[in-house]
Image: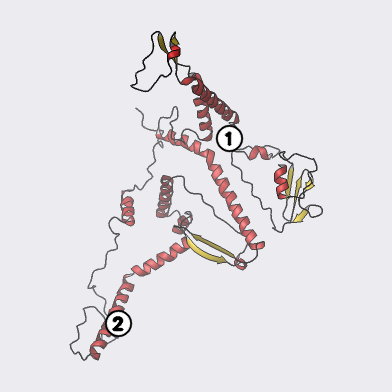
Amino acid sequence: MVLDIRQRYPKWGNPKGRKVGEVVDVISYWDRKYRCELADGEPLLQTGDGIVEHKYGFIPFVFIDSGLGNMNSKGDAEKRYVGILRYIYDLLVAESRDFSISDVVLKREAWPTTDIVGKNSGQVTQYSQEYGDVNRLPDGVEVQKKVNAVPPEALNAHMYRTSDYISAHAAPRSVRGLGETGVRSGADRRLMISEAAARYRYSEDAFRNGTAKVLTNCARLMKNVIPGSIRVWAHTPADEFDIEIDKAKMKEPFTCYVEFAPISEEDEYRRHDDLERMVTAGIVTKRWARGQMSNVNPIEMEIDEEREKLRNDPNLQQAVSQYVTGKLYAAIAARQAAENIKNLPEMPAGMTPPGAMPGTMPGTGQPQEAGRALVPPIPQTAPLGSAQDLQNKLKGQRRPQPINQQGQGGGGNRR
């Protein structure tokens, strides 16, 4: 509108003399190097001819379609970039009209009224309608209850039917958890749900791809336009980092991966279960499966796994234990020698005396012969009630084949 243009560009001359609330024809031109803004044919950028160099190196706009439009031979944008309410504008108007009519009728006609008639009706100055009250009326006075008309049932039925049409267009019955007419088996039920979900599937991919393009453009702006280094930080229950990005290390092309939050916990569990099955079957690698989850860093996870293996290595634990025990007895021996104590405590069996290397025979330095360990190894089992214990139980109860096999032989059970 004229008001918006005047607030942003005070020097605009309003060549067509429009009023404050009128709409202005605005043309915005962008290419990889230049931009131009016109309002009713007059340049808004005060640079002579109205054309300036933006120095971005690309067009800073990303067009994302919902997947609900149509492509025609002319490539009209109004046909392709449409919303989910495109074909139900008349239904929305009809629903609003039906609600208004029903609301007006209820306010005026639905509440019952009371009439007092008779020769002495003028003597009645107060009449109570509360529960349990008794009204004493003069002789010849009669009370008549008048029940007014309520909105006809046809009006309510039409309003409900219109609302159902709108809901069915925005979200089919199967998506909203309602039954479909004629659906008998589980296979047909899943087919109906898949057909309904297909309406939104392309939109999810389109928005994911468009968001990745937006992030790529932001990275290019940080690299080529914004001066200085960039600090990125986050303090959330899931992420905790504070880093500074050196633009000299940013190399094009930039690739961004975008994933939206799962619809439900059940869908997320099913997706993780499918990834686990593919890893177990050897179809994909563990690193690839971890890359499909946005909350997991595959590289950091591999590093943590190697650290965990080193910490749980029996040889490393034995070496550390012997080293610590040797240091402890060496300290005790030094303390006793300083206090002139002759009776030293005996070394436990299997321990290395002070000064000896772990894994060698005392006094010889020769490797010990292989034999049965004095202490059995500690079993690596998860604590009872822990998350790993629950996962092990679920894994033992899980079937090797997918559960959803109904309909593969021609439909469900019929009697």
- Badge 1 is on which residue? 85
User: Quarter of the image containing the C terminus?
Assistant: top left
Residue 380 visible somewhere in the drawing: yes
Image coordinates of residue 211 in percent, x first then y, are 58, 51
Q: Is residue 306 above or below residue 35?
A: below
Give the mark nearer the N terminus: 1 vs 2.
Answer: 1
Image coordinates of residue 261 in percent, x first then y, are 48, 49
Of 8 and 166, which appears nearest the observer? 8
- Position of 79 compared to 389: left or right? right
Quarter holding residue 362: bottom left
Which amino acid type corresponds to the residue marked 2 in the rendered image? Lys
- Badge 2 is on which residue? 327
- Position of 23 compared to 410: left or right? right
Q: Residue at x 36, y 17 (%)?
A: 135
Quarter holding residue 351: bottom left
Which amino acid type corresponds to the residue marked 1 in the rendered image? Leu
Image coordinates of residue 48 in percent, x first then y, are 82, 54
Of 43 and 8, which appears nearest the observer? 8
